[in-house]
Image: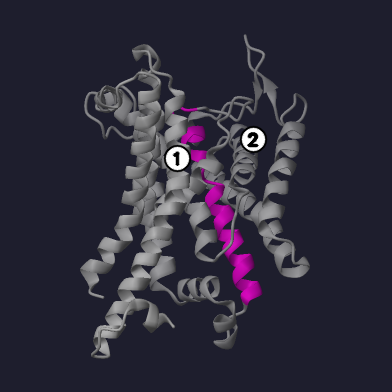
C-alpha cells in the first residue's frame, strides 16, 4: 500500500466520524423543527467573532492536555480513566502552594507546574502499581481513584485546612495566587479583549515532546510494542511491568497540567475553589479517540470540541437548545468507534489485495485471509 493511500485511510476514520455525527445531529434538529443549516451557520458566525475565537483556543488548550494524558495510556493499551481526579487533585495542591508563597515569577510558576505534574503522576502511579503487583485493572482502579480524589479535595478544601472563604460570597477556595505566580496571556487573536492562555506555549511543547518520545525514541518504540503485543515485547527483553508504571506516571504527569492554564492565567481562576471546572478528563477520552492518539490529531479534536463548547453559547438566544452540542459530542464518540471499525476492515481487505497482487494472482481477499 503506497504512502499517500495509507495516509488517506488513516484520515478517513475521524472524517467519517464527524460526518456521521453531523448527519445524526441534523436529523435530531429536523425532528424538533429546526433547520440544521441555519443552526450550523449561526455557530460558525459566532465562532468567527474575536472573543469567541479566543474562548475556543483556550478551551482547546485545556482539552489538549487532557487528551494527551489519555493518549499516552492508550498507546500503551492502558485506559487511564482517572485523568479527572488526577488534574483536580493536582490543581488544588498546586494552587495551595502558589497562593502561599511569593517567589520570583519564573521560579514561582515553574515550581507550581512541577508540583502539579508530580501530584498527577503520583496519583496515576498508584493505579500502575496496583496493576503490576496486584493485577488490578487500571480501568477499575483509576475510576475508584477519581472518587478518592474527590473526597481528598473535599476534605482539604475547607476553612482551616487549605481553603479560605471568599469575601462577599459563600464560595471557598485556596488563597489567591499573587501576580508573581501568574502567566500573562498572549494576544494572538486581533481585536479580542481576551487573551489566549500563556501556557498554550507549554501545550505546544508537551505535544512535540509526546510525538518525539513515542515516535523517535527507543522508549516510545518499546511502549508501542508493549501496547500492541506483550509477548513480543517480553521476547525482545522489554520489562512490561516497568513500562506500565512509567506510562501511568507520564500519563498522570500530563494530566496534572490540565487545570494549570486557567488557574495561572492573569484573568483566570486565580485559585482552586468549589466551582473549578470538572469533567475535563472524560472529554479528553473522546478527543484522544477522535485524534487517534496522535499529537496533531488530538490538537484538531481539541479545537473541534472547543468550537462546539464555545459556539453553543449563542444557541439559546437563537431559540435552539444548546444541549444539541452535547448530543453532537456524544454521537462523535459513538461514531468514532463505528468509523474506526469500518476503516480497519477496509484496510485489512486492501492489504490482502496487495498481497494477492504481489503474489501475481487475483485471489479474493477471503481466500488470502484463509
**Image: 305 above or below 193:** below
* Residue 343 coordinates in the image, percent (x, y): 36, 61
Q: Quadrant of the N terminus?
A: bottom left
**Distance of label 2 from label 1 (alpha carbons):** 38 Å
Mainly helix, strand or loop, the magenta region? Answer: helix
Residue in the picture at 49% in, 35% down: 264
- Specify start and end residues of the magenta stretch as a single range: 240-268
Residue in the picture at 54% in, 77% down: 229
Residue in the picture at 23% in, 90% down: 360
Q: Give 290 or 152, whichever is nearer the viewer.
A: 290
Q: Give 31 or 143, whichever is nearer the viewer.
A: 31
Mark 1 lies on residue: 331
* Residue 72 coordinates in the image, percent (x, y): 51, 59
Label located before the other in sequence (2 or 1) = 2
Discs 2/1, front: 1
Say if the magenta span includes residue 133. Answer: no
Left or right of residue 115, residue 311 in this image? left
Q: Which mark is residue 157?
A: none
Q: Quadrant of the C terminus?
A: bottom left
Within 10 angstroms of label 2, few (less than 14), some, or many (20 or more) residues? many
* Residue 312 coordinates in the image, percent (x, y): 39, 25
* Residue 40 coordinates in the image, percent (x, y): 29, 27
Within 10 angstroms of label 1, few (less than 14), some, or many (20 or more) residues? some
Residue 257 visible at all? yes
Where disc 2 sits, the SS reads: helix
Q: Which mark is residue 96?
A: 2
Where disc 1 sits, the SS reads: helix
Q: Determine the residue located farthest toward the bottom in the rendered image.
A: 359
Left or right of residue 49, residue 220 in this image? right
Left or right of residue 273, residue 353 in this image? left
Q: Is there a contact, CB below 8 Å, between mark 2 and mark 1?
A: no
Amino acid at each position: 500500500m503506497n504512502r499517500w493511500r495509507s495516509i488517506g485511510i488513516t484520515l478517513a476514520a475521524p472524517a467519517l466520524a464527524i460526518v456521521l455525527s453531523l448527519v445524526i445531529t441534523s436529523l435530531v434538529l429536523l425532528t424538533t423543527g429546526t433547520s440544521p443549516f441555519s443552526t450550523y451557520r449561526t455557530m460558525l458566525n459566532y465562532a468567527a467573532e474575536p472573543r469567541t475565537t479566543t474562548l475556543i483556543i483556550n478551551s482547546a488548550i485545556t482539552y489538549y492536555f487532557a487528551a494527551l494524558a489519555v493518549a499516552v495510556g492508550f498507546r500503551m493499551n492502558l485506559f487511564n480513566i482517572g485523568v479527572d481526579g488526577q488534574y483536580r487533585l493536582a490543581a488544588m495542591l498546586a494552587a495551595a502552594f502558589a497562593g502561599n508563597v511569593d517567589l520570583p515569577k519564573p521560579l514561582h510558576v515553574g515550581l507550581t507546574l512541577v508540583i502539579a505534574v508530580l501530584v498527577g503522576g503520583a496519583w496515576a502511579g498508584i493505579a500502575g502499581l496496583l496493576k503490576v503487583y496486584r493485577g488490578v485493572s487500571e480501568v477499575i482502579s483509576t475510576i475508584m481513584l477519581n472518587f478518592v480524589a474527590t473526597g481528598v479535595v473535599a476534605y482539604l478544601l475547607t476553612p482551616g485546612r487549605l481553603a479560605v472563604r471568599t469575601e462577599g460570597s459563600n464560595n471557598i477556595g485556596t488563597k489567591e495566587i499573587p501576580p508573581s505566580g501568574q502567566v500573562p496571556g498572549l494576544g494572538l487573536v486581533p481585536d479580542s479583549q481576551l487573551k489566549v492562555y500563556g501556557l498554550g506555549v507549554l501545550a505546544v511543547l508537551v505535544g512535540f515532546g509526546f510525538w518525539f518520545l513515542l515516535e523517535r525514541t527507543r522508549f516510545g518504540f518499546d511502549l508501542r510494542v508493549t501496547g500492541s503485543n506483550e509477548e513480543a515485547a517480553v521476547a525482545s527483553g522489554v520489562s512490561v511491568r516497568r513500562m506500565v508504571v512509567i506510562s501511568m506516571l507520564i500519563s498522570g504527569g500530563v494530566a496534572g497540567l490540565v487545570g494549570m492554564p486557567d488557574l495561572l492565567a492573569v484573568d483566570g481562576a486565580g485559585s482552586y475553589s468549589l466551582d473549578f471546572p470538572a469533567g475535563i478528563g472524560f472529554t479528553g477520552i473522546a478527543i484522544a479517540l477522535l485524534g487517534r492518539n496522535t499529537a496533531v490529531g488530538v490538537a484538531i479534536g481539541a479545537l473541534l470540541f472547543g468550537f462546539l463548547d464555545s459556539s453553543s453559547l449563542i444557541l439559546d438566544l437563537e431559540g435552539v437548545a444548546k444541549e444539541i452540542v452535547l448530543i453532537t459530542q456524544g454521537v462523535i464518540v459513538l461514531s468514532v468507534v463505528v468509523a474506526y471499525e469500518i476503516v480497519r476492515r477496509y484496510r485489512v481487505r486492501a492489504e490482502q489485495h496487495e498481497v494477492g497482487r504481489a503474489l501475481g494472482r487475483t485471489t479474493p481477499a477471503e481466500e488470502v485471509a484463509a
